[in-house]
């Protein structure tokens, strides 16, 4: 028996990007000519509806198939299909840069004074380039999400590596891949746990201010 849809439309509206942000994000998306409409087929689902669905999955961690079509006006299969296409073509790297720029300019600016970085292991049963042996279970493949945030917790840099890559090695990648230019005239501190405590990481962080 199919489970009832207990999520109402109002609750999923929270996951829709603000209009001002969406106007910036849509410039990063590939432009597609709607060939199906010209041939009499179904019109192409709007990118905004797809983005709303993707944001919902990323925020809640639910399965793709858990999305109901009436929430965003698009089926879960279409949302997942376009997500995979955009991932392969590097769209999300562009979106990340646009979102950080939006945060810096229109949300009060980046809190540079205190920054923090950490990582989290995640299972990767299907493998892929960014995977490696899971340190806690060598028989399984895993990935590691490395994240650097500002003092309010806003992501400034994300690096995906294999689960077997040491955190201190990814620290340099996190610092150099921040999409905004770091201000040279502001006092800055970087918080990290013991896994990052290495002389070369300290030296590089100091060289970056």
Image: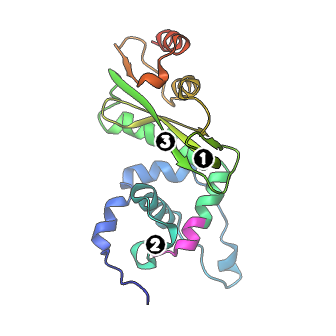
In-front residue for pair 9/129: 129
Q: Which of the numbered marks, if any, corresponds to residue 66? A: 2
Q: Is residue 76 magenta?
A: yes
Q: Which of the numbered marks, if any, corresponds to residue 179? A: none
Q: Is residue 18 above or below residue 100?
A: below
Residue 140 x/y as whole percent: 63, 50
Marks 2,1: beta carbons within 8 A: no
Range shown magenta:
73-80
Which comes sooner in the sequence, label 2 or label 1?
Answer: 2
Residue 43 x/y as whole percent: 60, 78
Element carrying mark 1: strand
Residue at the spot 44% in from the left edge and 64% down from the top edge: 62
Marks 1,3: beta carbons within 8 A: no
| Residue that mark 3 sits on | 98
Q: Which label lies toward us, 3 or 2?
A: 2
- For the C terminus, the image quarter is top left
Viewed as shown, does residue 56 lie left or right of 172?
left
Within 10 Å of disc 1 (Cα), the crowding (few <14, some 14-19, many 20+) is many
Which comes sooner in the sequence, label 1 or label 3?
Answer: 3
In this view of the protein, can residue 30 be seen by the observer? no
Q: Is residue 27 magenta?
A: no
């Amino acid at each position: 028996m199919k489970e009832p849809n207990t999520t109402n439309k109002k609750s999923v509206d929270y996951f829709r990007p603000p209009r001002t942000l969406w106007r910036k994000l849509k410039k990063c998306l590939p432009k597609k000519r709607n060939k199906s409409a010209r041939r009499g087929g179904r019109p192409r689902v709007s990118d905004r509806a797809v983005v709303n669905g993707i944001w919902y999955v990323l925020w809640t961690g639910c399965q793709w198939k858990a999305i109901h079509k009436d929430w965003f006006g698009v089926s879960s299969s279409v949302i997942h299909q376009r997500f995979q296409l955009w991932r392969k073509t590097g769209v999300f790297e562009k979106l990340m840069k646009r979102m950080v720029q939006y945060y810096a300019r229109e949300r009060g600016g980046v809190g540079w004074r205190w920054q923090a970085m950490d990582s989290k292991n995640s299972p990767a049963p299907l493998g892929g380039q960014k995977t490696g042996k899971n340190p806690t279970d060598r028989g399984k493949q895993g990935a590691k999400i490395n994240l650097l945030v500002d003092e309010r917790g806003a992501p400034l840099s994300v690096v995906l590596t294999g689960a077997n890559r040491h955190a201190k090695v990814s620290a340099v990648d996190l610092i150099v891949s921040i999409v905004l230019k770091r201000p040279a005239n502001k006092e800055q501190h970087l918080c990290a746990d013991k896994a990052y405590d290495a002389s070369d990481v300290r030296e590089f962080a100091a060289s970056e201010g």
